[in-house]
Amino acid sequence: MDFRTWESAEWAAFGGVGALIVYVVIGVIALRQFRESRRLRELEYRPYVIVDFYFKGFSVYLEVRNTGRNPARDVTVSFDKELVSSDDRRAAKFSIFDQPIPMMAPGRTIRIPLGSGPAFFEEGQTAPLSYEVQVTYTDMSGKALRDPPLLLDLAPYRHTVPPRDDAADLVAAVREIRNTHRRWTSNGGLKVISTDHLRAERRRDRTDHWYDVRHAFDQGGVRAVIQAEVQHFRRRFG
């Protein structure tokens, strides 16, 4: 094939074939990008149900949480061994895992107490320290979802200290502010002591004091008045 002998029609046909090849390649790339973006969008908006330990002080909880952006239905949580709390008993509180959870909305959390953290490491303790958890569920369209197994292990927390619960401290501070606000308010308004009220109280105090002085003088003379004044001074100034 000698390109030097090609006429314009042959060059035009060659250019059309080349353009067709380019369009096919672009189409294949666009289709792959579309499929990838669709897959990423589905991953972004699908439900994600995880199981993990939750610590509050020295207490250990088992937490099931939907961290995704859509509800999860028919959530089934299974363990490779029987769940046992730190008191070495399988309590009825674990029966929630005996059947699927009908639905977990986004952000929904189910928290179940497992017992005291230090009790898991006591000598003679038979409660397992680790579990392999399998979680299966469906999205709202009915598509079955099965994530890789989760490994829960308490062993790394043997010599650790409980995490600081800043949320609890914040709640306590807000509660104290609320109680203080209630003490300073009445009938929806702020309690205010006016100057007229203070003047009236001072007049009553002076009248009561003068009555006490006269009564002390009638009872014991000048000495009784002096003793009454000393007691009045102590009550007033501590």
Image (spheres, rainbow, N blue to C red):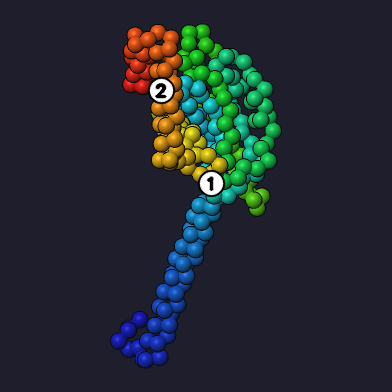
Q: Determine the secondary structure under disc 1.
A: loop
The percent position of residue 203, horizontal first and vertical second, equals 42, 32
Q: Which is more toward the observer, 153 or 24?
A: 153
Disc 1 residue crowd, few under 14, some 14–19, many 20+, Cα 10 Å: some
Let me know if residue 142 appears in the view: yes
Q: Which is more toward the observer, 10 or 48?
A: 48
The percent position of residue 13, horizontal first and vertical second, equals 42, 85
Numbered label attached to residue 210:
2
Q: Which is more toward the observer, 177 or 215?
A: 215
- Residue 84 sits in quarter: top right
Amino acid at circle 2: Trp
Disc tally is 2
Write the residue at 40% across / 87% down: 12
Query: Which one is in front in this view, the residue at disc 2 or the one at disc 1?
Result: 2
Write the residue at 57% across / 25% down: 113
Image vertical order of residue 167 relative to residue 208, above or below? below
- Residue 162 sits in quarter: top left
Please give the residue where the numbered disc 1 appears in the rendered image: 68
